[in-house]
Amino acid sequence: LSFNGQRCTALKLLFVPKDHAEQFSNMLAKRVEAMSVGLPWESTNSKYSQITPLPNQGRVEYMKTLIEDAVGKGATIVNKNGGMIVGGGNKGGESTLMVPALLYPVTPDMKVYEEEQFGPVIPIAPYDSL
């Protein structure tokens, strides 16, 4: 999730053996929930924000579309407040600060399975064999 998943080397889809996927998802959710979400210059307990705003409202809408599509097709948001928009925007606009959303189980029929999200969405796809 470094740089909110907005870099080419960010993990876009995690494949986890089916027998371990639910446990892995819950463990990762706890780690994601422990990350600080805020503006880059804000700090809590001497720790700067690890998750910062998306670059524009269009990216927020795209993340929401991916999340809604996955949830509508059977995935759940595993972590608390996943996908929630935090704070107010500049000059009365909407905020672009999104809490990461860990999605499980992700399947091939979901947009997030095929499309690179470049944002704070973490899809986990369980598998029996590759």
Image (tube, helix red, strand yellow):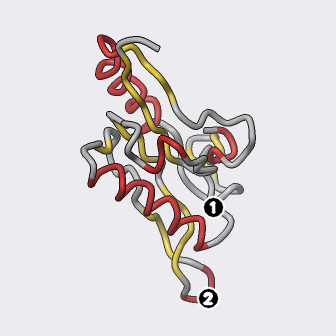
Left or right: residue 129 versus residue 73 is: right
Q: Residue at x 32, y 26 (%)?
A: 26
CA neighbours of label 1 inside 10 A, class few (<14), some (14 to 19), many (20+) = many
Residue farthest toward the bottom in the current orientation of the protein: 91
Location of residue 106 (image quadrant) = top left
Left or right: residue 109 versus residue 42 is: left
Name the residue nearer the viewer: 102 or 73. 73
Amino acid residing under circle 2? Lys
Q: Please tell me whether residue 62 is drawn above or below residue 33 in the rendered image.
A: below
Name the residue nearer the viewer: 122 or 79. 122
Q: Please tell me whether residue 11 is drawn above or below residue 68 in the rendered image.
A: above
CA–CA distance in space, label 1 to label 2: 17 Å
Q: Are marks 1 and 2 in contact (CB under 8 Å)?
A: no
Q: Residue at x 46, y 64 (%)?
A: 86
The residue singled out by tag 2 in the image is 91
Q: How many marks?
A: 2
Image quarter hosting the N terminus:
top right
Location of residue 85 (image quadrant) = bottom left
CA neighbours of label 2 inside 10 A, class few (<14), some (14 to 19), many (20+) = few
Query: Which element type, helix, strand or loop, lies under badge 1?
Result: loop
Q: Residue at x 43, y 18 (%)?
A: 16
Q: Residue at x 53, y 33 (%)?
A: 13
Q: Position of residue 51 (x, y in %)?
A: 59, 48
Amino acid residing under circle 1? Leu
The residue singled out by tag 1 in the image is 54
Query: Which element type, helix, strand or loop, lies under badge 2?
Result: helix
